[in-house]
Amino acid sequence: MPRVKGNRKDHRKHKVVLKLTKGYRGTRSKLFKRANEAAVRAGEHAFAGRKQRKRDMRRLWIARISGALTSFDIKYSRFVDGLNKADIKIDRKMLSELAISDPKAFEEIVKKVKKA
């Protein structure tokens, strides 16, 4: 009986991995073993990046709010504490949007926070 070398399943897997690594430099886009290493690593970085993006956005919102608060002579930490005491449930994303697009509404929130 003749020896059968390779199968459809393996060939399909190789094609999928090589398609994923299309555009990578050198052997990382040509050879399966190197391409598979590159694809796995890229997947790890993509996964970590999705977590990192959430952190980065939160830092951006905090920086925007803090910048908007400088004209009201109140620090960010005091502002957040005042929000909790005044029982205002607005997240940082919405607060930063208000600070940019609707300064009057943001000013009203700051006044309520200062009273609390």
Image: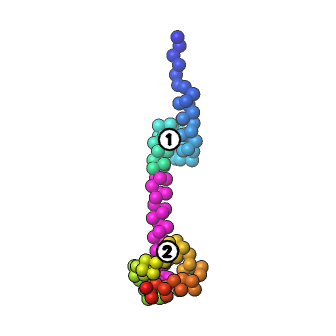
Q: Position of residue 56 (x, y in %)?
A: 47, 66
| Residue, disc 2 | 89
Up-down relation of residue 60 to residue 113 (above or below): above
Nearer to us in this view, 76 or 18: 76
Does 61 appear in magenta? yes
Circle 2 residues within 10 Å: few <14, some 14–19, many ≥20: few
* Residue that appears at 53% across and 25% down: 6
Is residue 59 in view? yes
Q: Main secondary structure of the magenta part?
A: helix
Q: Position of residue 13 (x, y in %)?
A: 54, 35
Nearer to us in this view, 103 or 30: 103
Q: Residue furthest top?
A: 1
Q: Which disc is residue 63 wearing? A: none
Q: Amino acid at mark 2?
A: Lys
Q: Residue furthest right?
A: 101
**Callout 1: SS:** helix
Give the extent of the magenta segment. 45-69
| Residue, disc 1 | 35
